[in-house]
């Protein structure tokens, strides 16, 4: 009985198919968004919604300049409050605003503005303006910026970025205030 030559062909085709499937899986993972899909409206129970509203009301944060946040002209960034203060020479905050942090946060401490850039693409792939960088560590660059489209970073993203996003108006105020070598005080 003659031998069939289809065995090696089937093996080659199977290996090629597995290679294509593996490559497509890698490509899909590499281009997937860094944030989870939003839950459908109405997917939370009524009890959960009541609890969320109650928690939101009890978590109102103070806008007062944090104690022990340094002296002199400086930017103060409170990690827990997700808030920034632009503090003048008189020790008073001329402006305060909420920010949207990325997954990575700098350690509390005193830093200085190391660079500024009018615009570009943020490490999360979003077009940004008024970038004020104050620290970098382990490949993560920490800085304030405003997204041109007004978006905020996803704090649950898999990619570790150090963007601290502001509204466009607050980004303009930060840009005008925070000059090179200015102190940036990060508090818990």
Image (tube, grey):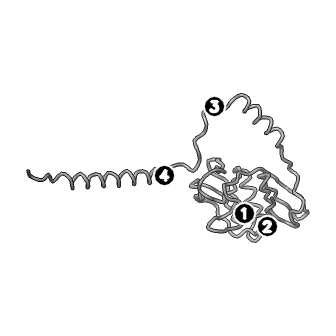
What residue sits 75% from the left and 56% below the top? Answer: 173
Query: Is residue 171 rendered to the left or right of residue 58?
Result: left
SS state under label 3: loop
What is the number of the mark on residue 109?
Answer: 2
What is the number of the mark on residue 29?
Answer: 4
Task: Please report whichever mark, 3 or 2, sits nearer to the chain's N-terminal start.
Answer: 3
Residue 152, given in percent of the width and then of the height, sits at: 66, 49
Task: Please report whichever mark, 2 or 4, sits nearer to the chain's N-terminal start.
Answer: 4
Asked if the residue at tag 4 contacts the one at tag 2, i.e. Cβ–Cβ closer than 8 Å, the answer is no
Q: Nearer the viewer, mark 1 or mark 4?
A: 4
Depicted 184 relative to depicted 78: above or below: below
What quarter of the picture does the C terminus occupy? Answer: bottom right
Residue 52, given in percent of the width and then of the height, sits at: 75, 36
Q: Residues within 10 Å of mark 1 (few under 14, many from 20)?
A: some
Mark 3–mark 1 Cα distance, whole angstroms, equals 35 Å
SS state under label 1: loop
Depicted 176 relative to depicted 39: above or below: below
**Residue denoted by label 3:** 43
**Residue denoted by label 1:** 106
Mark 2–mark 4 Cα distance, whole angstroms, equals 36 Å
In the image, 26 versus 135, the foreground residue is 26
Residue 86, given in percent of the width and then of the height, sits at: 81, 58
Mark 3–mark 2 Cα distance, whole angstroms, equals 41 Å
Tell me the quarter of the picture where residue 57 sits. Answer: top right
Query: Is residue 132 rendered to the left or right of residue 110?
Result: left
């Amino acid at each position: 009985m003659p031998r069939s030559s289809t065995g090696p062909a089937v093996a080659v085709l199977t290996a090629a198919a597995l290679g294509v499937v593996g490559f497509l899986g890698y490509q899909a993972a590499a281009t997937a968004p860094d944030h989870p899909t939003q839950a459908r409206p109405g997917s939370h129970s009524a009890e959960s919604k009541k609890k969320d509203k109650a928690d939101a009301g009890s978590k109102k944060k103070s806008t007062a300049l944090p104690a022990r946040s340094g002296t002199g002209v400086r930017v103060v960034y409170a990690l827990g409050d997700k808030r920034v203060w632009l503090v003048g020479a008189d020790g008073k905050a001329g402006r305060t605003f909420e920010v949207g942090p990325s997954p990575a946060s700098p350690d509390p401490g005193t830093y200085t503005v190391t660079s500024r850039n009018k615009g570009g693409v943020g490490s999360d792939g979003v077009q940004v303006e008024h970038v004020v960088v104050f620290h970098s560590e382990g490949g993560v660059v920490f800085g304030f910026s405003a997204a041109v489209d007004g978006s905020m970073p996803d704090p649950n993203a898999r990619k570790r970025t150090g963007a601290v996003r502001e509204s466009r108006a607050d980004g303009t105020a930060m840009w005008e205030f925070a000059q090179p070598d200015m102190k940036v005080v990060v508090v818990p």
